[in-house]
Image (cartoon, rainbow, N blue to C red):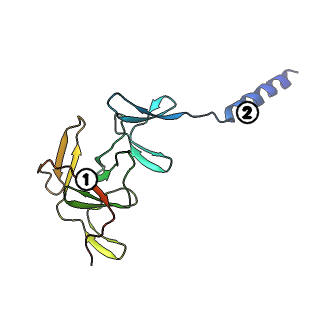
Amino acid sequence: MVKKLILSSLIAVSVIGIMPTAASAVWKQDKYKNYSWIENGVKSKGWKQINGEWYNFGKDGVMVTQWMMDNGNWYYFWTNGIMASNCWIKNNGFWYYFDGSGKMIDRKIDIGDKLYDFTAPAIIVSKDANGNEVVTNITTNGNVNNNTNITASTEIIAGK
């Protein structure tokens, strides 16, 4: 009798332990109109894939919507927070290409049947942690100007 009771208890605990529990995840907007991704009551931080798209929520859990450097690589996030990938972006008169992993290309590369050289100086307009605009020359790291004209394009700009 005691063995049956123990066995029944173990089976019940095992079944409860392997049953999936529902996870909750929602977008939250703060009073400054910044978005965060909340999973089970916890704000996501850093890189996160949501519905097949990549986002970054920084160290503070706020969705990135601009240029961002991570581990020596530049990335760009659209105003909806989705990481740019496999696309061209024109910023401050300079063209940039982002590969499938979202990294900005900074070397010579074949795209389609054309060779592009991204080793020339480029200017990136971004914001610091306080929301202040920062303009960086990625070759010399010098501040140069404050123009923030950013557009996206699939226009071909050079050939081989």
Q: Quadrant of residue 118?
A: bottom left
Q: Which of the two residues, 58 or 124, is positioned nearer the viewer here?
A: 124
Residue 158: x and y, percent?
Answer: 25, 73
Against 160, residue 57 (above or below) is above
- Quadrant for the C terminus, please: bottom left
Q: Secondary structure at mark 2?
A: helix
Question: Percent x, y for residue 132?
Answer: 19, 38
Name of the residue lying farthest toward the top = 2
Task: Check disc 2 and report the residue beneath it.
Answer: 15
**Disc ID at residue 78:** none
Q: Residue furthest bottom?
A: 160
**Residue 159 x %, y %:** 27, 76
Rendered view: 16 above or below 81 = above
Q: Give the amino acid type for the residue marked by disc 1 in the picture.
A: Ile
Q: Which residue is mark 1?
A: 150
Label 1: few (<14), some (14–19) or many (≥20) C-alpha neighbours in 10 Å: some
Disc nearer the start of the sequence (1/2): 2
Circle 1 — which element?
A: strand
Residue drawn at x 27%, y 60% is 96
150 horizontally vs 80: left or right:
left
Q: Residue at x 34, y 45 (%)?
A: 79
* Residue at the (13%, 55%) spot, across then down: 140
Amino acid type, residue under disc 2 in the picture: Val
- Tell me: residue 16, above or below residue 128: above
Image quarter hosting the N terminus? top right
Say left or right for 27 vs 66: right
* Mark 1 → mark 2, Cα distance in angstroms: 54 Å
- 91, 136: nearer the viewer: 91
Number of marks drawn:
2
